[in-house]
Amino acid sequence: MGAKTKNDQRVKRKVRIRKSVKGSPERPRLSVFRSARHIYAQIIDDTRGCTLVAASSREKGVMAEAAAAKKVDSAVLVGKLVAQRARAQGIEKVVFDRNGFLYHGRVKAVSEGAREGGLQF
């Protein structure tokens, strides 16, 4: 029997994607999670199993800037913020992990913001 809920279907897609997308010390993985209200992004080194950089729309700086803005606009800010923090740690290139979500809307906005911030993928 197939997956029952939308989240079960997303998790199945995530498992399929993660078979090929792996983060290394040279090219860590930029993982995006989207909830109904917020968006989270983190850069992960899968060989050590640790998060190197993280940003989310729940942070005070992002919430203050995007208070009256749309959720897509706050997603762009999160992408730029994670890119800025990554570049401060010397990370230039990443592998994008959409985490089973469609590459559309807020997930796409995070990736575009990260590219504007100077990350390459």
Image (cartoon, rainbow, N blue to C red):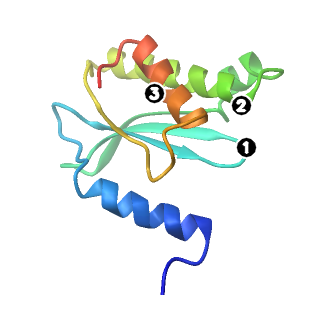
- Residue 111: image tag: 3
CB under 8 Å between discs 1 and 2? yes
Q: Earlier in the sequence, mark 2 or mark 3?
A: 2
- Disc 2 is placed on an element classified as helix
Q: Residue at x 67, y 22 (%)?
A: 73
Give neighbour class at mark 3: few <14, some 14-19, many 20+ (Cα, 10 Å): many
Task: In this rendered view, identify the residue nearer to me: 89 or 31.
Answer: 31
Q: Nearer the viewer, mark 1 or mark 3?
A: 3
Horizontally, residue 105 falls left or right of residue 82, namely right
Residue 86 in which image quadrant: top left
Residue 107 image point, x, y percent:
53, 36
User: Label 1: which residue?
Assistant: 37
Residue pictured at 29% horizontal, 20% vertical: 120
Res 71 label: 2
Image quarter in which the C terminus is found: top left
Q: Judge the density around disc 2: few (<14), some (14-19), many (≥20) Cα neighbours within 10 Å.
A: some
Q: CA distance from mark 2 to mark 3?
A: 14 Å
